[in-house]
Amino acid sequence: MKLLRVGAPGQERPAVRTEDGRLLNLSSVTPDIDGVFLASGGVDRARAAVTAGQLPELDQDGLRVGAPVTRPGKVICVGLNYRDHAAETGAAIPARPVVFMKDPSTVVGPYDEVLIPRGSAKTDWEVELAVVIGQRARYLEGPQAARDVIAGYAISHDVSEREFQLEYSSQWDLGKSCETFNPLGPWLVTADEVGDPQSLGLHLSVNGVKRQDGHTSDMIFAVHHIVSYLSQYLVLEPGDVINTGTPAGVALGLPGTPYLRPGDTVELSVDGLGSQRQTFAQA
């Protein structure tokens, strides 16, 4: 099942995307796609409503697509999780997941404008597989237990400002938490539909030039391991988002470091999860 939120910022309505591309209004089932919905059997209720033909169709013409979950309580990120990306940035392969947090207010819709911060010279792109948590989780006993707390997956664009991230502080927060720096969506694809999260291709182009073409099988730490690992240190709540890392091809690691400028367009996709497109503008 593909769940999404549509409408103007702050006025999004929950919806379901059918296999034939129609959008069905989910407002009779839930007021929003959030942690309460995910943790209370909401996906099953939505599936039953679709099967029963109870949901009215939405007119998609001119309809904005927002992030597929309401603002998460946490956005947890794993850095340097692809061997080729670690190599291109000159970093050693980490022995344990590199974990940092991103301001949840960075989460915007998959086609929303992204703002290059004032004073930025090194705004960069990163296509990632995002995990959305569906059940409260603490001290999970291994990867198998992690499977049971994942609601689904989405495309995440972990936009980064490298000078802020790497040169202004020993922590990465300044370069990761600028406004609009985490487009998410277009929809949340439930875990049962995705299947094996280590079998997905990730793709990104800038102004029509392919920059990233990776695969989740190349992760250093697999998705279920990451979720289990994080639960040893953080309580994962329904609706939390985990960005699982990016493959090689970011501007930081390319010849000439072609960082993003106002007017640039980035298109990204993950197999089975749809696609995103953003135009960058000056803040």
Image (cartoon, rainbow, N blue to C red):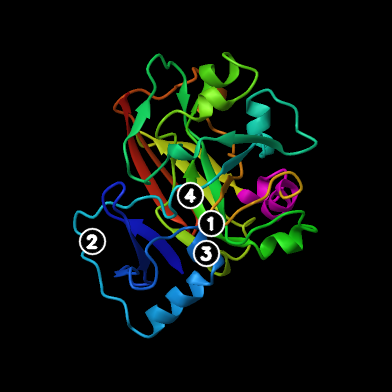
Q: Amino acid at mark 1?
A: Tyr
Q: Is residue 229 above or below residue 84?
A: below
The residue pinned by badge 4 equals 155
The residue pinned by badge 2 equals 60
The residue pinned by badge 1 equals 153
Q: Secondary structure at mark 3?
A: helix
How far apart are the two marked residues, 2 and 1, measured between alpha carbons? 23 Å
- Please state if 14 lies on the left or on the right of 149 as rendered: left
Q: Where's residue 277, x and y in %?
A: 35, 43
Q: Where's residue 101, x and y in %?
A: 59, 35
Q: Is residue 24 above or below residue 35?
A: below
**For marks 2 and 3 on the same chain, the one whose residue lies earlier in the sequence:** 3
**For marks 2 and 1 on the same chain, the one whose residue lies earlier in the sequence:** 2
Who's the residue at 50% across and 76% down the image? Answer: 44
Residue placed farthest to the bottom in the image? 52
Q: Where's residue 150, x and y in %?
A: 61, 60
Q: Residues within 10 Å of mark 3 (few under 14, many from 20)?
A: many
Question: Which mark is drawn over residue 38?
Answer: 3
